[in-house]
Image (cartoon, grey):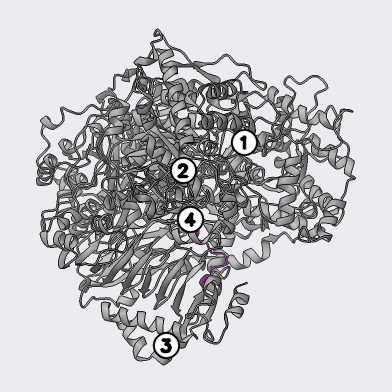
Amino acid sequence: MSLHSASHVVQSVKLFAGNPINDSCKKDLVFVDFVGLCAGKKCKKSSGGGRRRVGSVNSRRNHFLGSNKNWASSIQSVIDLERVTNASTQHSSDLKPKAANLADILAEKGECGVGFIANLDNKASYGIVQDALKALGCMEHRGGCGADNDSGDGSGIMTSIPWDLFNKWAHDQGMASFDQLHTGVGMVFLPKDDDLLKQAQQAILDIFKQEGLEVLGWRPVPVDASVVGFYAKETMPNIQQVFVQISKEENIDDIERELYICRKLIERAATSAAWGNDVYFCSLSNQTIVYKGMLRSEILGRFYFDLQNDVYKTPFAIYHRRYSTNTSPRWPLAQPMRFLGHNGEINTIQGNLNWMQSRETSLKSPVWRGRENEIRPFGNSKASDSANLDSAAELLIRSGRNPEEALMLLVPEAYKNHPTLMIKYPEVVDFYDYYKGQMEPWDGPALLLFSDGKTVGACLDRNGLRPARYWRTVDNVVYVASEVGVLPIEDSKVVMKGRLGPGMMITVDLTSGQVFENTEVKKRVAQLNPYGKWVSENLRSLKAVNFLSSTVMDNETILKRQQAYGYSSEDVQMVIESMASQGKEPTFCMGDDIPLAVLSRRPHMLYDYFKQRFAQVTNPAIDPLREGLVMSLEVNLGKRGNILEVGPENVSQVILSNPVLNEGELESLLKDPFLKAQILPTFFSIRKGIEGSLEKRLYKLCEAADEAVRNGAQLLVLSDRSDELDATKPAIPILLAVGAVHQHLIQNGLRMQTSIVADTAQCFSTHQFACLIGYGASAICPYLALETCRQWRLSTKTVNLMRNGKMPTVTIEQAQKNFCKSVRSGLMKILSKMGISLLSSYCGAQIFEIYGLGKDIVDIAFCGSVSSIGGLTLDELARETLSFWVKAFSEDTAKRLENFGFIQFRPGGEYHGNNPEMSKLLHKAVRQKSETAYLVYQQHLANRPVNVLRDLIEFTSDRAPIPVGRVEPALSIVKRFCTGGMSLGAISRETHEAIAIAMNRLGGKSNSGEGGEDPIRWSPLTDVVDGYSPTLPHLKGLQNGDTATSAIKQVASGRFGVTPTFLANADQLEIKIAQGAKPGEGGQLPGKKVSAYIARLRNSKPGVPLISPPPHHDIYSIEDLAQLIYDLHQVNPRAKVSVKLVAEAGIGTVASGVAKGNADIIQISGHDGGTGASPVSSIKHAGGPWELGLTESHQTLISNGLRERVILRVDGGFKSGFDVLMAAAMGADEYGFGSVAMIATGCVMARICHTNNCPVGVASQREELRARFPGVPGDLVNYFLYVAEEVRGMLAQLGYEKLDDVIGHTELLKPRDVSLMKTQHLDLSYILSNVGLPKWSSTVIRNQEVHSNGPVLDDTLLADPEVANAIDNETVVNKSVKIYNVDRAVCGRIAGTIAKKYGDTGFAGQVNLTFTGSAGQSFACFLTPGMNIRLVGEANDYVGKGMAGGEVVVTPEENPGFAPEDATIVGNTCLYGATGGQLFVRGKAGERFAVRNSLAEAVVEGAGDHSCEYMTGGCVVVLGKVGRNVAAGMTGGLAYILDEDNTLIPKVNKEIVKIQRVVAPVGQMQLKNLIEAHVEKTGSSKGAEILKEWDTYLPLFWQLVPPSEEDTPEACADYEETTSGQVTLQSA
C-alpha cells in the first residue's frame, strides 16, 4: 500500500486552503482508542500508531508531498470504555516514595524536531508567531502520525504572554485591563464532561483562594475542532485560560514561585479526585504561555484561533514537533513543556527518577518559606522523560537558579580532558566538579530549548547526537532549529551561521538584547560562586594503593571459597585468568545456546537472571572505543547535600577514579574520618530451616542500614568476607543485599545521606560489576577475584609458561592491574550500549531486565525492573545459594573446581542447543537425503531438556487432523525461510556462496551480512559442467541457472561494501540496528581474517582488524532511522527495507516507531543468535528470548493499527519445524535460520570461528582450510525441505491447511506440563495472551507493494526527457532546480537508476545538476561517477552519504552577509561510508565529518568533533578549525589540517595515527591540487589566500598518517630512495 497516492494530493491541497475535511473521507476509518489495560503482570498500553507524513506545498513549484491514503486501523475499539475509565481513576494517594517503574517508562518515548526564534531588541511582533508556525510545517517529516493519519504525535509553541490579545478580550467582556506585573495566566486542559468540569474549576478556584490569589476570570480558548484528527478529537480536552491576580508579591520571581506552588497543590489535589486525570496545566506563569496539542504541525495554527490573530505579539517563540515512538500520544505530552522543548531521549531516566525521589526529604531553600513539602513530588514515572527533565529544571529555577545554570547542572558537557576548557576556562571545570557528586547527569542524546520569559536558550547533550543549527539576521533576530531551511531567508541577510557542537549552549538575554555563545554563558555561571576554592578544600581524592604482592590464603582455602561462592573452572580459567594475563575481556563465538538460568538444571549465580538493556532505534549506543572521551567511570562517595543551596559543605565527598577497589583502597575508605563507614555483614542463618530465613535476614539487614545512616554513617560497606566460613550461615547473594538496602533507603528518604560499597567474593565478571552498580552500589572490592589473580600468577604452571615464552610475562601486581583494567573497559562497553556515558548516571539506574525471578524478590530488591515471566521465590533462591555453599563443606567435593560447561560444551556439563551429537545427526540426514535420519534428528530435539521458553509450551487444537495432502506444499512454505546475516569475512566464500545458492534454488532468502558482496555473484551461472563452474571454481554441486547473490543485502554501521550498485541489486535491504550475539555493539572482524579479497570488498586494508562502530552515526534516533529507510527506498524503490532488532522489554514501542518510519519488514532476533566473534559477557548477558520480543512486537503493532504495514520476521536458535510453527502462532510471517544453516553446510561446532582456524573451512579465510569445505548447496536445500515437511505434518495434525491460518493464533498454544528443577512459578500468560488479529492474512501482508517515499524531486528529474536521454545514451545534460529542506535524499534515486544500469563505474555520460536553496537530509547520497552536483545554499545532515563517485560542491549564495569560512553550511556525518567521488564545501561541516570514508576526497573549511573517524581510505583536507577527537579509529587514508593558531595537537586521537608536517613532495602536490580544485569550484576566498601565500601556509598544515599509509609516496619524504626490503622492514 503506497504511502502517498495521487487521489489524496488534491485533498491535501484543500487542507491547506483551510477547508475542513468533509465526512466522506472519514468513513473508511476505524479507530482504536487509548486504553490502559493490565494483562497478567505486565501493563500493556495499546495505542494509536501511524505513519509519517510530509505536508508542505510550495507555491513555487508543483511538488506536493501529499497526504497518506487513509487506511483502516486494524482493530475495532469494542472495549468497554466505561470499565476502563473507572479502573484508571483508582489512584493511590499516598506520597511515599516508590522506585520508578520501567514498564511505565518504556511506554512513553519520543523524538522530535525543535527550534526557537528570538528578537534581540525584545520587540514583540506577530511575525515571530507566523515564522514559528511556518518552521513547524517544514519539520513535519520529523514527526509521526497516528493510525488515522491525522492526529499528530503532538506539536506546540511557547511564547511570552500576548497581553494585548487578552486585554482586548477583557475589554469585550466588560472587565478592566490586566495588571501585567501582578497577573498570572494559566493555559489549562480541563475535563470535557460538564459535571467534572465544574468540580475541577471549583477545586482550582478554592486552591487559588486559600493561597490568597484572586481569580479574575476563565477564558474558553477559541479553537477550530474540525481540523483535529478523529483520534485526537476523542481525547481532546476542554481548553481554557485562567487569569489570577497576585497582589501580595512585587518581585517577578516570587510571583512565579507563588504560581508554581498553586499548580503543585492543584496537581496534588488531582491525584485523589475524579477529574484528576483530565486536568493539566500547559503553563501557569506571569511570563510565558504554551499553546500545544495532539496536532500535526501544520494544523496547530489553524486549531488555535489566537495564533491567527495579528494582535498576538511576542518577542520570542519556541516550537516543537513530536515523533513519539509507540505511542498513544496524549495531549499533555505534546511539547514544549512548561520550561523546555526537548528533542531526544534520556537513557538514565529510571535512575534519575529514583534519585530525585530520594532527594525529596533533603531539599530545602529559604525562598520556599518552609513550604517544601507542598511542592512534592518532583518526578512522575508515568510522564515522559522530557516532562520529568522539565520538572527538575523548573524546581531549580523556581528555587532561584538561572536557566543556564540549571541546565549545566542537569546536562553537563564532557568537560574532562577538554583541551579548550582546561586551559582557558578552569572555573567552568570547577563548576562541573562541584556539582558532579550532587546531581547525577540526565544522560542521553538531547537538544534542549528553554526559556523563562527573560532568557531564551538552547543546549546540546555531551555527545552532540542531535543536529542543532543557528543563524542570526541583519534585523537582529536569532534562529535555532533542528534543520536549516525551515524558513526562507536570503543569505545576504544572514550575519552569522553556526551549529551547536556537543555540550554547547547558546542563550539570548531578551532584556539586554545580547547573544551569549557557549563559553561566555558558562563562564558567567561559573563565576557566581568560588567553586574552585570549595572543591580544592573539601573534595578528597582516594589515593591509589598498591596491590598485594602475595596471596592471603592458602590454595585449599581459596578453592573452598571459590566453591562456596559459586565459581566454576570456566569462570577462573576463561574469565579471570584471561583478564589477568591480557588485560581485556575474553572473546568467544557462536552465540549463547544454553538454557536461561531459570530453566537450567544447574545452580546459577543470581546475576545470571539479569540481562543488560541496550539502546536500539529510539536512542543510540555510544562508542566506548573511539569516543571514550565523553565517558567517565568516576564516582563520588559520601553524603549528597541539599541541591537547592550552594556552599562548601556540599562538596565534602571522596572521589574515586573508578568503582573497582583493591583491599588497600577499601581499608583507606574505612579509615576516612568524615565518611564514618559502617560494615554490615551479609550472611543468613539456616539453623531453623530455610523457609523464610533469607527474607527475615534481609529485613534485619535493611534495619541495620537504616540505623547506621541515622547515626551519621556516610558509607555502608556490605561485606561477605569472614575469617571462617560457617556451614549454617551461607552468604546472601550480594546483588540481593545491595538491591534491598538501596531500595529500603530510597523508600525511607535516607538514600542521599550515604553511599553503598560491596566488599564481596561474589563478583568477578564485568556483567556482575554492572549489576551491582546498576542496583545501587557505588564501588566494589572483588577480594576473591583479586586473590584468584594472585594465585594464578604464583602457580607453577603459569611461572613455567612465562619462563618458556608461551605467555607474556606479567608481574603479580600487573596481573591484578590487568584484571581491573579489563573490568573498567567492560563497564564502559556495558554503559555505552545503553547510550550512557557516565557511571554516576548508571549507578542505581537499573538498566536491566529480569528473566526468572518472582515478584517477592523483585519487590524487595529490584523494584521497578521488568520481570515478565515471574520465577523463583526468596526461599527457592535461598536453596539455590545453598547448593553452592554446601560444596565447600562436603567431604566428597572434588579437589578442583567443577566445570559447569556454561561457556563451552562438555560431556556431563550444561546442555547446549548446538551440540556435537545434534550436528552429526543433521549432517547424516542432509548428506544422505534420508527421511529416517531426519526423524532421528527430530526425536533428538524433542527429547532434549527444557532449553528455551517455547519448550514450556505445546500445541492444542479443537479441529480433527486432516491428510497431509491437503496442506500447502513445502515449496510454498520454504519461501518464508531466510538465513542469518553472516558476513563474508566472518565466514568463508564457500559457505557464503553455498548458502546463497541453496536459498535461491528454494525461493527463500539469504542475507549478505555486513561485508558487501562480489558483483561476480549477481548473474546466473551458465557455464556449469559436472557440478563445477569456472566462475565460482571453489564450489561443487552447482547447476546451470544457480545464482549466488544474496536476496537480502545488509547495511550495517560499518557500511562495509555498501555501494550504489550493491544497493541497486538487492531484492531486500536490511538495516542492522542490533545483532543477537551482542546487541548495542558493532561487529568485529579480527585482522587475521581480513585477507586481500575481503579487504577489496570492504574497501579497507588487508590484515587490519575491522571494527564496526556501534549503530549511532545515522541511525541514532527514530527520525534518523526513518531517514535511512527513506534513503534506501530512494536509491532502490523496488527493494523492501527491513530493520533488524533484538528482543528486549520495550521492543514493541520500538517496532511501532520503525513501522511509522515506513519500514517494510521488522526482524526480531533472540539473544541466543549470533555467529561471529564477540565478548563472552555480551554473548551471555544481553538481549532477551525472541518468544517475548516477538509477542510484544506483534501485539503492540496490532494495538497501534500498524501490523498490516510490516512483515514480521524472527530468528534465533531455530532448528526445526516445531520452532517455525511456534513462531507462527506467536505472530511471525517469516523465519530465519542462522547457526543451523552453517551446520547443515558442514560446520562441526568447534566454536573457534574467531581464531580463523575453522577445521572444516566454514569460518576461515585460510586457503588450506577452505579447501576442506565439505558442503554443497544441495545439503541445505534438503534441510529446508525437511523442515517444511515437518511443518506440513504438524499443520495436518492440528487440522489446518496453510500457515496463514495459524499465524498469530495464540489459542493454539497451551502451557506444557513439565516440571522444572528450580521453580514452578513461571508465568507464560504474556506469551499466550492475544489482542486480536491483523485485518489481512500473512500472505497478503507479505505480498504488498514496497512502501514508497511518495512523490519525490528525483522522480520529477528522471521524468525530464533530457535527463532520461543522458542516462540512456550516456550523453551530457545540465539542469537547474530549486530545493527545499523537505526534499530529502535528492539525487539518490537518479544514482540508483544509473548504478542498476551501468554498475559503480561504467557510466560514461554526465548529469550536471545545480540546486539552489536549503537541501534536506542525505543530499547527494549514493552518487555514482558521472554525476556532478552543485548546491548553492546550505544543506542538512548526511551530505554525500555512501557516494561512490561524481562530485558535490556546496557553496553559499552570492554576497552572503557572513564570512563563508566561519559559517556551518553542511550538517553532521557527511560522507558517511563514501567509497569514491569528491566533495568541496565552502564553509564548515558538523560533527563526525567523513566517518567511515573509504575512498572519497573532500575539502572543507572547518569541521566538528570526531572528524575522519573510522576512515579506511581517501583524503580529507580541512582549511580551518576542527573539534576534538580527530582521526579516532582511522586505519587508512590521509588527512591534511590547517592549524593557524597551533591548537590541533591536543585534539587529535593519537591511538592510531601519527602527526607530521607535509614533507613528502607527492603529499604537497596532492594537497595543493585539492585546494586548487576547491577554489576553482567554490570560489573560496580562504583557499585563494592559502594558494597566494603558499610558502607561508604550507608549514602550518599537519598531515595525519595511519600506519597503513606510512610507506606511501604522499606520506614518506624519502620514498624514492627506499628499496623494497626496507619498506617491508618499516611496515613490520
- Whole-Å distance between the Cαs marked 4 and 1? 25 Å
Q: At label 2, which amino acid type do we have?
A: Ala
Labels 4 & 2 near each other (Cβ < 8 A): no
**Whether residue 840 is visible:** no
Please give the label number shown on residue 1346: none
Mark 2 or 1: the one toward you: 2
The residue range painted magenta reads: 409-422
- Outermost residue, front direction? 1026
Badge 3 is on which residue? Answer: 1593
Look at the image and tell me whether residue 980 can be seen: yes
- Tag 3 secondary structure: helix
- Label 4 or label 3, whichever comes before in sequence order: 4
Q: Nearer the viewer, residue 697 or 954?
A: 954
Residues at discs 1 and 3 in contact (Cβ within 8 Å): no
Q: x and y percent of residue 1507 in the render? A: 45, 67
Q: Position of residue 549 (x, y in %)?
A: 85, 57
Q: Position of residue 1405 (x, y in %)?
A: 21, 67
**Residue under the point 55% across and 46% down:** 1172
Residue annotated with mark 1: 743
What's under tag 4, amino acid-wise? Val
The residue tagged 2 is: 994
Amino acid tagged 3:
Tyr
Q: Earlier in the sequence, mark 4 or mark 1?
A: 4
Q: Earlier in the sequence, mark 2 or mark 1?
A: 1
- Relative vertical location of residue 1215 with respect to residue 166 in this rendering, above or below: above
Indicate which disc, 1 or 3, sits on the residue closer to the N terminus. Answer: 1
**Nearest to viewer (mark 4 / mark 3):** 3
